Image: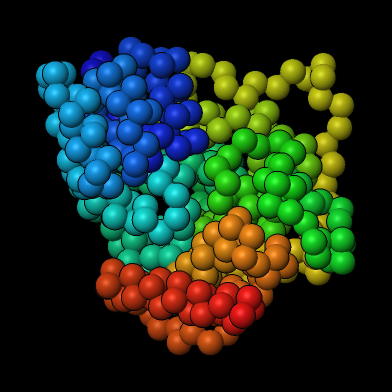
């Protein structure tokens, strides 16, 4: 059997690097045909020399020229500007781009009737009404790479008819670095504290989102988009060990959970191999060492972003795009120490409250909602620090 052709959008990020680790573990099964990055020249050149893709896409013009020069003597590698060019030559595309910028790759992959391993939750959350029809394209398949949604995907494989048998989806949350701390305790937390995730090694933006539980709220919206489950039937439970990655409760009272040690290479490998499984046991549990599994409800007073995301999800239309964009700007402002941790919620809430929500019928409307939300968020932040 010919190896699966893989393209990786965001190859120099955390998901991209781990995808290449998975491919290296099973080199006879996969071949890299495309890599894309923003401006990380040295690392993408190193990756290209090792994996020899036919396309390398660099969004930054200056970085693109440097990569082109570095690979000039290497035959068979074309350096381009647009990452979507990879989507027609791969069997599976792993989208590890951070933020709304991942939308073009999501759409191009599905339009080309290819399998999409989606780690970029924002593109589905922000543009759900536009992306959903593309899932009906012949050959198109969307397999989630988030550990929680991958877990739900695996649990739902046991159902004959999800519309009739599923009672509830339960997303687990580690609780982040601030689990157990009160609203008042979080008034003056630092960027460094927020970046100290207790169980996962992730990029800075998603790590901050984990500290506020905004990531879990966005995952609730993503679960709704992926599986069609209503918001009243999607719950969140805090599970600090991050071993149970999510659960599905069925109408007869049964609950099926997916368990593994925290290792993003498992959901990445699941997306690469779907509908088969990898032979390499990433995240294997040593049951002689696992002594307890704890669960508790989230503190919605301390972590207000969770309910804010539920609010946006229930509003529908462009509301998820607005909350996703406003949160990105607020997180960036927090990391640059312009606002406090609590104000991440305040900025996002203010933008959502003052936005006009419509049902988008085109990508342009989603992009416009994203742009307006970012501009509004900057105005709110400027008012906070003036």
* Residue 53 in view, yes or no: yes
Q: Quadrant of residue 103?
A: bottom left
- Residue 197 relative to residue 149: left or right: right
Q: Nearer the viewer, residue 41 or 32?
A: 41
Please say which color scheme the image uses.
Answer: rainbow
User: Furthest-top residue in view?
Assistant: 28
76 versus 236 height, above or below: above
155 vs 327: above or below: above
Single out the residue that lies furthest toward the front. Answer: 386
Q: Nearer the viewer, residue 115 or 208?
A: 208
Measuring from the top left, give residue 384's x and y in whole percent.
64, 78
Count the labels in the image.
0
Q: Quadrant of residue 7?
A: top left
Evaluate whether residue 156 shows in this view.
no
> Which residue is depicted at the point 24% across and 20% down?
52
Assign the N terminus to one quadrant of the image. Answer: top left
Instruction: Please report the residue visible at 45 percent of the width from the left and 22 percent of the height from the top.
Output: 22
Where is residue 165 drawn, in percent x and y? 59, 54
| Rendered position, 286 above or below 118 | above
């Amino acid at each position: 059997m010919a190896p699966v052709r893989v393209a990786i959008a965001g190859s120099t990020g955390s998901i991209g690097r781990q995808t290449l680790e998975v491919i290296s573990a099973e080199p006879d099964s996969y071949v890299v045909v495309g890599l894309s990055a923003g401006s990380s020249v040295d690392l993408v050149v190193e990756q290209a020399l090792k994996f020899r893709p036919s396309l390398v896409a660099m969004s930054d013009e200056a970085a693109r020229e440097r990569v082109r020069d570095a690979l000039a003597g290497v035959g068979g590698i074309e350096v381009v500007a647009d990452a979507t060019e990879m989507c027609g030559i791969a069997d599976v595309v792993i989208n590890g781009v951070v933020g709304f910028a991942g939308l073009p790759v999501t759409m191009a992959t599905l339009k080309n009737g290819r399998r999409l391993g989606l780690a970029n939750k924002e593109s589905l959350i922000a543009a759900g009404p536009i992306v959903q029809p593309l899932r009906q394209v012949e050959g198109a398949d969307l397999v989630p790479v988030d550990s929680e949604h991958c877990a739900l995907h695996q649990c739902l494989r046991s159902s004959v008819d999800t519309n009739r048998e599923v009672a509830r989806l339960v997303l687990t949350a580690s609780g982040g670095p601030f689990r157990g701390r009160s609203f008042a305790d979080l008034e003056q937390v630092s960027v460094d504290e927020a970046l100290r995730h207790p169980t996962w090694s992730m990029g800075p933006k998603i790590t901050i989102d984990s500290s506020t539980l905004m990531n879990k709220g966005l995952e609730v919206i993503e679960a709704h988009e992926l599986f069609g489950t209503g918001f009243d039937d999607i719950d969140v439970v805090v599970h600090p060990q991050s071993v149970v990655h999510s659960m599905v409760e069925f109408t007869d009272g049964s609950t099926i959970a997916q368990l593994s040690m925290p290792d993003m290479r498992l959901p990445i490998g699941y997306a690469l191999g779907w509908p088969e499984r990898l032979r390499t046991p990433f995240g294997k549990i040593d049951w002689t060492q696992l002594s307890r599994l704890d669960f508790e409800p989230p503190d919605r007073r301390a972590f207000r972003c969770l309910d804010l995301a539920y609010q946006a999800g229930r509003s529908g239309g462009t509301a998820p795009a607005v909350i996703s964009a406003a949160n990105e700007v607020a997180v960036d402002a927090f990391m640059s120490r312009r606002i406090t941790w609590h104000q991440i919620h305040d900025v996002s809430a203010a933008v959502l409250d003052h936005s006009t929500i419509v049902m988008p019928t085109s990508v342009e409307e989603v992009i416009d909602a994203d742009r307006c939300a970012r501009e509004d968020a900057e105005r709110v932040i400027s008012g906070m620090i003036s």
